[in-house]
Image: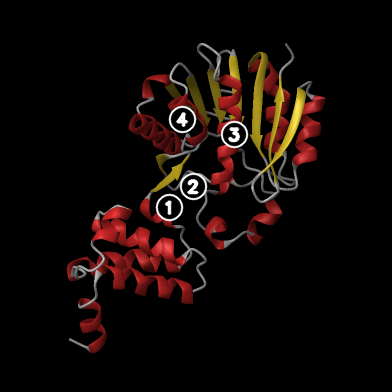
Amino acid sequence: MVDAERAASSRTLGQTWRALRDRFEAAGIPTAALDARLLVRHVLGLDQTGLIAREAEPWPAERGPALDALAARRLTGEPVARILGVQEFYGLSFGVNAATLVPRPETEMLVDFGLGCLRDRPAPRILDLGTGTGCIVLALLANLPRASGIGIDLSAEALDQARANAENLGVADRFEALAGDWFAPLTGGGFDLIVSNPPYIATGVIETLAPGVRDFDPMAALDGGPDGLAPYRIIASEAMDYLTPGGALALEIGHDQGHMVEALLKAAGFTDIGVASDLAGHDRMVTGFARK
């Protein structure tokens, strides 16, 4: 056994994840410590408390190749959520696959808004356009036990993931996944809330995105057309037909799209239109209400 192999085999769990952290830091990964802990925990089947409690234990040599394989993927820029196939969102665990975006913290704004609109309604109905993992509508259903929802997506693989997430969260009996383009699969309206995190990156900008997004996120979930606004034009022009009187629309947007999407909703007849910023101070959500 060479010295490097002997050193690796004699490491503790704590020394192993810290050594991996150092590799990630040297590669310029900004979340090096968190990523290292998550990968080690995954390989060993431990939660955070378990890793802390067992840091002084010897690293099991037979698990080394599995950790090395995951680390190599992270060093190519692949996000940890894609490597592990799971991401937390709104305090819930969501499976992800190649056809879905990884749920992001900023998107939780849409859930907050939806809960504020629907908490006092007896049996609200929710529509999620471009549902992906289903994270928005399923987080709402998990917090609104009398609500029901529909998620629409072009991707059959994404819809399979959304259905699996609904099962895991115990809301499958109140969720329906439909394949199609925006509103096309629907046979009726009557929704109290429509939500969407549509593709909003201008086609020409996609190549400039961070590698973790550009190389691993599904292109169909990124490309919003030449100016990034193509999905918003469709949603704004048709949403009113599917909302109940006074029903709400909430859309995630790119940081520079607030005023443009606001104008689209205004032209479509929405009222009480608002643009909300995320914690970084960037425009992130546009909301409006159907006429009563």
Q: Residue at x 72, y 27 (%)?
A: 236
As drawn, the label of residue 110 is 3
* Residue 43 shows in the view: no
Q: Amino acid at mark 1?
A: Ala
Q: Nearer the viewer, residue 39 or 99?
A: 39
SS under mark 1: helix
Q: Residue at x 32, y 66 (%)?
A: 69
Disc with the residue nearer the chain's start (1 vs 2): 1
Label total for image: 4
Disc 4, disc 3: CB below 8 Å? no
Residue 17: % across, % down: 33, 68
Left/right placement of residue 150 relative to residue 43 reads: right
Residue 42: % across, % down: 30, 56
Q: Which residue is mark 4?
A: 138
**What is the C-alpha distance between the residues marked 2 and 4?**
15 Å
Neighbours of disc 1 within 10 Å: few (<14), some (14-19), many (20+): some
Observer-side mark, 1 or 3, equals: 3
Disc with the residue nearer the chain's start (3 vs 2): 2
SS under mark 2: loop
Disc with the residue nearer the chain's start (2 vs 4): 2
Disc 3, disc 2: CB below 8 Å? no
Residue lying at the far front of the rendered structure:
53
Q: Amino acid at mark 2?
A: Val
Q: Which residue is mark 2?
A: 102
Quadrant for the C terminus in the image: top right
**What is the C-alpha distance between the residues marked 1 and 3?**
21 Å
Q: Nearer the viewer, residue 234 or 166?
A: 166
Disc 1, disc 2: CB below 8 Å? yes
**What is the C-alpha distance between the residues marked 3 and 2?**
15 Å
Quadrant for the N terminus in the image: bottom left
Q: Which residue is mark 1?
A: 81
